[in-house]
Image: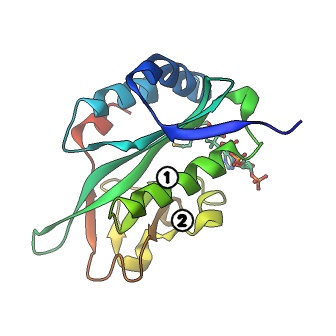
Amino acid sequence: MTRQVTLRPETKNDFSEVFEVNRAAFGRDDEAKLVDALRNNPKAFIPELSIVATENDKVVGHILFTRIDIEDDAGNLHEILALAPMAVRPEFQNSGIGGRLIEKGLAAAKASGYRSVIVLGHEHYYPKFGFEPAGKWNIKAPFDVPANVFMAIELVEDGLKNISGTVIYPKEFETV
Ligand SMILES: CC(C)(COP(=O)(O)OP(=O)(O)OC[C@H]1O[C@@H](n2cnc3c(N)ncnc32)[C@H](O)[C@@H]1OP(=O)(O)O)[C@@H](O)C(=O)NCCC(=O)NCCS
């Protein structure tokens, strides 16, 4: 069966379904609450980069990109994006919805003028979309993680040129 899935920025009417999608996908509330908290942080939250996948007007997937900073050795801050979290309802997984959300999100981020994105995630999944270990640009996570799960992508040529250092996540991420 071919799924008729539509991708679009979320609206207020989607908030409770986005919560449910995250809760169902992660099997806990933490990421769902993180999304709610990030919506209330105007420095981090970018409405057009909170994107839902719907089928028959029901939200089946969600992806969020928020602003983060990278602090370099001289203490300068460089604003880029982080992809987190993303979720697809368990019964809808493995049919390409996650991949479509990533591709749509990266294109929307680029269209909004962002130049690069980092992600902490599965090392076999995100490279399909062009992510590479962030160590390539000397970008580090603020906590210990295996090098291959902390990744970045340039949305434009040299999008990470002269950007290196340690990621500073919005404080809302401390709860997950
Ligand atoms: C990760 C997730 C969003 C992918 O959504 P999806 O719609 O199933 O994604 P797609 O159909 O585009 O791709 C499925 C691929 O993801 C892979 N995948 C799914 N979960 C994975 C995991 N935990 N580890 C590694 N790979 C995984 C599948 O093996 C499949 O790979 P293939 O394309 O080589 O066959 C979905 O599995 C999910 O919601 N997982 C729970 C929440 C989560 O872990 N989110 C990501 C971290 S923020």
Residue, x 79% and y 36% (percent of image)?
A: 3
Tally of numbered tags: 2
Regarding mark 1 in the picture, which secondary structure is present there?
helix
Q: Using the rendered view, name the quadrant where residue 112 is placed.
A: bottom left
Q: Nearer the viewer, residue 168 or 46?
A: 46
The type of residue carrying mark 2 is Asn
Q: Quadrant of the C terminus?
A: top left
- Asked if residue 101 is positioned above or below residue 89 in the image, the reply reads below
Q: Position of residue 106 (x, y in %)?
A: 49, 59
- Asked if residue 125 is positioned above or below residue 93 in the image, the reply reads below
Residue 44 at least partly seen: yes
Disc 2: which residue: 148
Residue 29 at least partly seen: no
The type of residue carrying mark 1 is Gly
- Local packing at callout 2 (Cα closer than 10 Å; few below 14, some 14-19, many 20+) is some
Disc 1: which residue: 105
Q: CA distance from mark 2 to mark 1?
A: 22 Å
